[in-house]
Each structure stands twice: as structure tokens, then as C-alpha cells.
Image: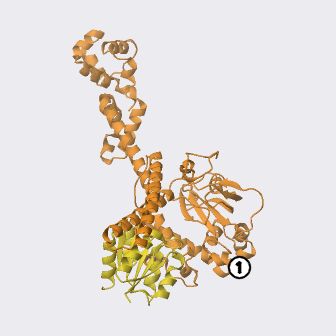
Amino acid sequence: MGKHVLLIEDEPNIIEAIRFILSRDGWQVDTHSDGMTAFDRVGALRPDIVILDVMLPGRSGFDILRDIRADPELCALPVLMLTAKGQVKDREMAERMGVSRFMAKPFSNTEVLSSVRELTGG
Amino acid sequence: MARSTLTGTRIRERRAVMGIRQADLARAVGISASYLNLIEHNRRRIGGKLLVEIARALEVEATALTEGAGAALVETLREAAAGHEGALADLPRIEEFAGRFPGWAQLLADRHRRVSELERTVEMLTDRMTHDPFLSASLHEVISAVTAIRSTAAILVDTEDIDADWQRRFHRNLSEDSRRLADGAQALVAYLDEGAEETGIQSTPQEEVEAFLRGRAYHVAELERALPPPPERLVAGAPELSSAPARELALAYLRRYRRDAELMPLAAFAEAARAEGLDPGRLAHRFGVDPGAVFRRLATLPREMAGGPVGLVTCDGSGTLTFRKPVAGFALPRFGAACPLWPLYQALSRPMAPLRAVVEHGGRRQGRFLTYALCQPTLSSGFDGPQVMEAAMLILPEETADLPGGAGQPVGTSCRICPRRDCVARREPSILADGF
């Protein structure tokens, strides 16, 4: 079985595209769309990497990232953050919170795939 | 310098412009050249018949010589000079400048007005890009659609062996997203066209503080302890507070939070809040504090202790929103002015008069809310300092408080995104009017 990625994103067609790209590369892809319960899902699935959107219903990606970094068992988890807000300020905030990589939408499929591979040592 | 004292200067300027020698002008009006010289250097007052004759000889109205540049022009120049340190030394000669070089003075005044207008525009654009919920949501929608299209299109182009089911699915997604993109772009263009006066970026210190508080559900548990950590430590450890102004605002907020918590300890306050049905007046009486402090304290109660969500908004004397804790169904504008019908603003115009009103919000999720509003002086500089007012409005949804029956006062978020077309308080047309 390939490595395991959890995609936390609420746009169905973006989910479908990313799922397709990563699945073809041998990844097991789980998805989650609700910000409120996303952190619990991370804890339950223990993926190898999380792809995290910033603007989610219920809770923002920043809040979820903060929880991940504060959890002793999850704090080392690679997190690739995707956001439509590509402002420097958001990037800086994500970096201060310990994001592994920050990518502004619209991204290229190749970038996503290579980032996921790099962040997981693949 | 009084305007009339520069009559001589204007005569000299006008004469020079017309290329008339001092002696010739003196002769034409029947005075000596030396007397005209004294007049031109403002050492002799001039009026009556002689002034009329000089004006006639110089082919201008006499008032043009006595009144010189318009008061409005001089005032504008004065404003321009006030904002420029290097010009302050020449401020006493501003009238002379306007009188001697009316064309240049007018140009300078026009440029100053234009710069002021442009600064205002930049401010509005920045404000809109930063705080406008509609614009933010629209941009997000457009970027999401573009992202999905780009990614899906790349899959279709780059994947040669894609199976027919996936291909159909991605074609359908492309069709959906392209429609979504077209709608979103159209809406954005229409919106920006309507308010072509506005653009910009960056978030504000206030937003950083709100992000910090939102991350804690507006309840700072550390400050509820008997021995709390210093607020400075909380601020230093908050990644959301990236700018110095934001940290300063947060520090002031947390210090006030702690003072409120000391006066109204959490457990006792939560119990009292339930017993008093969240009535801030009765709670203020019970704890011997002002109702404004109770508003703030209620807004920091965890949802389960308050019995439901509690919203709070405060503004200063200018009506600018200084704190926002929204509740579902009662959106608080991120930019510009809010709905003028909010009890918050009624309280602002009636300091110290407590207001309690049921309002009906006209947003997408129409709902009724019980509001309490009060405006108080902060007295931060004592009785002799400038009077600084702060108004606050507590917002309790139906799930949190028992609302009296009957129709509530209709309110919105702000005119621009309010669907109430016929509102008597409307400042500007709504972007929702044409199909948004």
C-alpha cells in the first residue's frame, strides 16, 4: 500500500482533482471537508501527510495547524497548506505556526505532487 | 496678515504682468512715482477714488486688488502647508504667495485637493480589500473555481490513459467550474464597477486580535485562574499577533479582560448569568460593576455557560467598530460603516441611556436577536480630558435568550450588502439588488 495522505478541503472538484493525481501516484487518499472535526480526523487516521486548506467551514486551517503542532503525537506531521489567500502575511503566519509548506491557489498539479513527495521523503 | 494690507503687492504684481513702468502708472492716475512706490510696498493704505483709478489703469476690478486670492484658496494652501513641515516657516506669507502668484497658488491648491482625494481613495480601497466580506468571499470563490479548472484541465491534457468514466466526470466538473467562474467574475466586476472608488490589501491589527481571540473562542482560560500569567506572556506566545500594533491592542484587551474577570469571577458570574437570564442590568447590579463590563464578560463566557452564543460589538465616538464578536445570522461588517439602525448607534447618540431592543436581521439567515446597548464615557483622561465615548451592543440570538414577542426592528449588516431595498436609513444602493 502506498503512503497515506489526508486532504482537508471543502471544494468538491478540487478534492476530486487532487485525489486523482495522488491516487495515480500510489497514494491512499482520505478526504475531510469540515473544519470543526478536521483535527479529530487527523488524530484518528494518522496519515503520513496532511494537505490543509485555509478557508474551511467551522474552523480555519490555521486553527487546525495550531492544534496539530501543539499535539505531542502529531506535531511532526508534514502539513502542506493550500490557500486562496496568497498574501505574504498569511504565508508568514503559517510559517510561524510551523507549516511544512505553503502553496497559493491556483497551484499546478506537478507542484502539489512534488511537494507531497518531498515532504514525506518520497 | 490682513488681506487688505496686501493691496499694494497686488498692484505691483499686476503692473509687472502688464509691463507698465511704475512712473507711467503713477502718472496715469495722477500721483507721484514715490507715492505709488510706498503704496506698492504696502506702506500706505489705499482706497476710494485712487484705488478705482489704479484698477481701471490695470484693467482689473478694484476688488481683485483689495481682496486678492479667495479665502477658500488661502485656506486650502494653509491645509497643504500644515501637513508639510518644511512649509510651516512660510505660513505667515501664505497670503502674499497667493496674491503674488495666483496661478501657481491655484495649481498647488488643486494638487493638494487631488492628493487628499487620492489618499482617501487608497484608504477606502485598502479598507474594502481588507475587510469587505463580500469581496473576500467572491475572490475566494473565483480563485477556488480557477484552481479546480486548472487542476482538472491539466489532468485531462496530461493523462493519456484516463478512463472514460473519469474523463466524463472531469468534463462535467470543468463545465460546472467554468460556469461558477463566469458567475463569480461577473459579480466581482459588477461590484467593483459600482464602487470604482475602492482596492487594496493587508489585514489590520484589529483583525489579528480578532483572529487570536477567535482561536480561543473569545475565552482566555489562563486569565480566569486565581494566579494568571501576565498578559504580556500570552501576547508573546500568540502567532496570530504578528504586528506590534496588534500586540499592543491585544495587551490592552487582555488587561481589561483580567480586570473584568477579577470583578466577576467565572463560576459565580456564569451561575448569576443563568439566574438572571443574561440580563446585563441585573448582573451589573449584582456585581456592583457597570453594564459595559457585564457586556464584555458575557461575551467571554464559554458557550455552554452562557446557554448559547453571545455576540458583542463595540464602537468609538466616531462609530468605528472597535471590537467584533459575531454570532451566526448577525454578520458584522469588516469594513466601513455598519447598519445605522443598530441600537449600538442609537446608544451612541444617547450616552448613559440603556437600550434593550429586539431586532430582525435581514441577511441570508434571517433571525431575531435581543440586543442590549449602552454608551459610556471612558474617562481615560479624567474629567478634564477630552470626552471619549465607547458604545457597546450585546447580541443574543433566540437560542441563547428568551425574546419578547412582536415584530423586531429591521436591521442589516451594512447598506452595501443589505437586501432591504426600501430602508429609510439606506446610504447607498445594495449590491444585492441586481441578482447577487
Report the residue that reaches farthest toward the front: B164
Q: Nearer the viewer, residue B409 or B253?
A: B409
What secondary structure is marked by label 1? helix
Near mark 1 (Cα within 10 A), the count class, few <14, some 14-19 or many ≥20, is few
Quarter of the figure with the N terminus of chain B: top left
Q: Is residue B101 left or right of residue B254?
A: left
Residue B155's image quarter? bottom left
| Residue type pointed to by label 1 | Glu
Which chain is orange in the picture? B
Q: Is residue B304 left or right of residue B140?
A: right
Image position, residue B207 (x, y; %): 47, 65
Query: Can residue B239 be seen here?
Result: no
Q: Is residue B263 above or below residue B179?
A: below
Q: Is residue B215 above or below residue A85?
A: below
Residue A102's image quarter? bottom left
Q: Is residue A66 above or below residue B412?
A: below
Colour mode?
by chain
Residue B172's image quarter? bottom left
Residue occupying the point 50% across, 68% down: B210
What's the chain of the residue with tag 1?
Answer: B
Q: Nearer the viewer, residue B152 or A95?
A: B152
Which chain is yellow in the picture? A
Image position, residue B310 (x, y; %): 63, 69
Residue at image mark 1: B271
